[in-house]
Amino acid sequence: MAVYKLLEDFDEHSYTLIAIHCSLEDYRIAYFLNSYINTKFSRLDFDLKSITDASFSVYEWEDLIDDTKWNLISNISKVSQENDEINLFKKDMSTVTNYYIPEHKKVDYFLKIDNGGIFKQSKFILKKIIEMPQIITAYLIDINQLKSKKNLIF
């Protein structure tokens, strides 16, 4: 009887993940990325939801020539909530901050480049992103070190 062995783990998704630090709104970073690295990001009709009901904006571009799917994902969601405590003020509002990838709380956006393997131009794209004057810094993230990498599968 023949024994078949699978060489690849089909549960593992391989993609390139770039962390971006900047102080821009999501639509502005998408616009500047479109200008500097010749992408065509457009906002999806839905936001990603977390367990805590926080919503995170997502921009997407499918490069049909290179068969690559690009996603720009916001990592920070701030929600204003009314406090139930009784105090001197009529309405006491507090801001709750949620993170899509909690182990990288200082990252503002993630750029996920998925082409079914290792993206060969990742260093070139990273260099172009770092050269943008609106970007504070950007760097590659090892997806094997992420605890919440399941959040990036959508």
Image: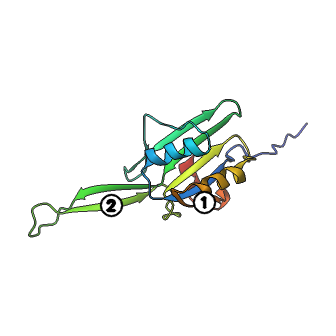
Front one among 69 and 33: 33
Query: Image point 37% across, 49% down: which residue?
Result: 53
Could you tell me residue 99's position as x and y percent?
45, 58
Q: Residue furthest right?
A: 1
Dot 2 crowding, Cα within 10 Å, few <14, some 14–19, many 20+: few
Q: Nearer the viewer, mark 1 or mark 2?
A: 2
Location of the C terminus by quadrant is top right
Q: Residues within 10 Å of mark 1 (few under 14, many from 20)?
A: some
Q: Label 2: which residue?
A: 96
- Tell me the tag on residue 85: none
Is 102 on the left-hand or right-hand side of 143? left
Image coords of residue 58 (percent x, y): 48, 43
- Sequence-wise, the earlier of marks 1 and 2 is 2
Amino acid under disc 2: Val
Secondary structure, mark 1, is: loop
Circle 2: element type:
strand
Residue 84 is drawn in which quadrant? bottom left
Task: Write the residue at 38% across / 51% down.
Answer: 54
Residue at x 66% of width, y 29% of height: 64
> Dot 1 corresponds to which residue?
146
Left or right side of 17 for 60: left
Cα distance between the residues tagged 1 and 2 = 23 Å
User: Do the residues bearing badges 1 and 2 touch, measured as CB atoms within 8 Å?
Assistant: no
Quarter of the rendering occupied by the N terminus: top right
In front here: 69 or 133?
A: 133
Note whether 49 is above or below 42 in the view shown.
Answer: below
Place of residue 16 in the rendered image (x, y in percent of width and height, measured from the top left): 66, 50
Figure coloring: rainbow
Mark 1: which amino acid? Answer: Leu
Which percent across, then down, holds residue 78?
Answer: 35, 56
